Image (cartoon, rainbow, N blue to C red):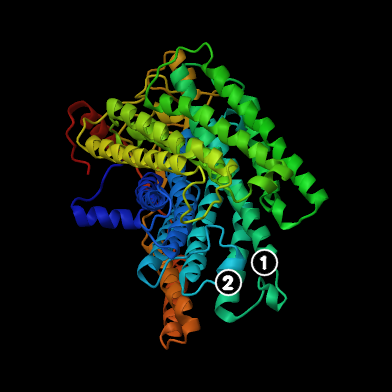
Amino acid sequence: MSSVAKKKGFGAHVWDYLTTVDHKKIAIMYLVAGTLFFAIAGFEALLMRVQLMIPNNDFISAGLFNELLTMHGTTMLFLAATPLLFAFMNAIVPLQIGARDVAFPFLNSLGFWLFFLGAIFLHLSFFMGGAPDAGWTSYASLSLYSPGHGIDFYVLGLQISGAGTLISGINFLVTIITMRAPGMTFMRMPLFTWTSMVSSALILFAFPPLTVGLFLMLVDRMFGANFFDHTMGGNTIIWEHLFWIFGHPEVYILVLPAFGLFSEIIPVFARKRLFGYSSMVFATILIGFLGFMVWAHHMFTTGLGATANAIFAVATMAIAVPTGMKVFNWIMTIWGGSIKVTVPMLYALGFIPSFVAGGVTGVMQATAPLDYQLHDSYFIVAHFHYVIVGGIVTALFGSAHFYWPIMFNRTLGEKLGVLTFWVFFIGFHLTFFLQHFLGLMGMPRRVFTYMGGQGWDLFNMISTVGAMMMGLGVVLLVINVLLSIKSEPVNRRDYWGDGRSLEWALETPLPFYNFKQTPLVRGYDPYWIEKSEGNKEGMVYAEPVGEIHMPNNSILPLVISIGTFVAAFGALYHPDGVSWSIPVIVIGLGMTVVAMIIRSLKDDHGFHVHVEEIEAIEKDLAAYRATGKKGGNK
């Protein structure tokens, strides 16, 4: 996503990104970091599938398999899917609501750096004595007795990274509530903005229990407390409650923005207004509420009792109702539309049956007696991958193609995109569809090998071939991204020709202030309304051209995050009795506190872009769009 650069040279660009508070550049950083961790987690998955390709395989050891299993799940959910969705939220939500930035640009930067350095800290475990090995849920019954520092890396890394996610969630909640353009009522907001708001609210309520659980785990492991150790009067089930009070909403934190992204893609390529907008909004709210309330269905087998199991079973099944409303509304939007089958639309068409399959098997798990049978089998692995990959990863891939012109003023190749879709989509179903049957045949999850002659060999072989095809699909997407760098710039608004919401009214490349004047929203699908009335600019404005207030860049978010990163190393090695652990903790926390004090005491009122500067920037951008050459206002 382009802004008007003020400096030149590689070093200046690096410094610009290290200090930026611009939501568009932070979106790019989330996209790059999320893609990096997505690739790492995908590679870990491939290693596991190679191990399980044939019976009695010794490609990797049991211990390494446990580490890969743990890091794959942890990375995919916390460090890949979440930041990639934050990338699209950063890139699109402020544009959709007619804002010039998020509510707290400084915190937006801090949220990214905390996430990124927490993720780096967690991955350093591979090189510093061993990665965590108790599964992505890190159940206390396993993690308390895990030797080495793997679990400590998990606890501290997720604590830092989770703080970043919580900060970002609060920021988007405030942004959407307070920074909408005049006329954009709640019932005129695009669905992606709606789902981002509900998802942010879920983050606000779901991450604190995880923070508490991780803190208790930390003091159990490092300071000899016994919150979870049943041999000393603790209770491991407390960890499971705290984890799943976070863990189940986490699925909806991820899947709701994915729903929102498809709710933007489908109307554009069906060339119809989204069917049942109001019901989609209420379904989003209802899914968010119910999604938060049903965590205990993950614990049917822990002996909660018949009454608790029945309540959580019914509540879980109830989620199918608003989810079904969404599916029917997407189908009714497509129904009778003048459909243009582009790459984003292909992903949308592939998403609907794939996610429905994942949802149906989820309802099956809501039946407690059946869950007793299928719990910890490969059926569960198939179910949640149909939800996560079929629902979220397809949304990320489709939205990358959809929003690339806005984010980078370039396009991803259509032919290569179609090839990528089919390779990935076929590979996905080959990988996970047969795992339903492996589970029904009794194959447990988390095993690193198995004996031959149980009827599992062929399905495991096919599943591994499918995983390799998914890996190939990701490689093709990366090639497409690299090729796009050399492609012709778009230099236009409404690349797909049927854009409906405000972000498509802006001409690329975007200026750093987004809108030279705050738009006036006159209804749902505001850009479509303006187009249909012949407004070539695509917007009417709520104000004349005037000074624009923008925030200053700052290095302090990075310094604060580095401080927590450094302090975490001291905390990690303190139980070993090393002499330098306390000084390192003090230095790290000192950096963080000093940076926070500087931020508190230093008056930073941002800067104003004057009318003459705005006109000069707009003139330069217009010249660049016309000639492809940058003007002098850089």
Asked if residue 502 can be seen in this view, the reply is yes
Q: Choose the circle earlier in sequence order: 2 or 1.
A: 2
If the image is split into quadrants, where does the N terminus sit?
A: top left
**Residue 50, numbered circle:** none
The x, y position of residue 444, in whole percent, is 56, 51
The x, y position of residue 275, in whole percent, is 58, 20
If the image is split into quadrants, where does the C terminus sit?
A: top left
Residue at 34% in and 34% down:
404
Closer to the camera, 631 or 56? 56
Residue at 49% in and 46% down:
453
Neighbour tally class for label 1: few under 14, some 14-19, many 20 plus, Cα within 10 Å: some
Which residue does the numbered mark 1 point to in the structure image? Answer: 236
Asked if residue 542 can be seen in this view, the reply is no
Q: Is residue 597 above or below residue 135?
A: below
- Mark 1 element type: helix
Which residue does the numbered mark 2 point to in the structure image? Answer: 144
Quadrant of residue 126 within the rendered picture: bottom left
Give the Cα separation between the discs numbered 2 and 1: 10 Å
Say whether residue 533 is left or right of residue 220.
Answer: left
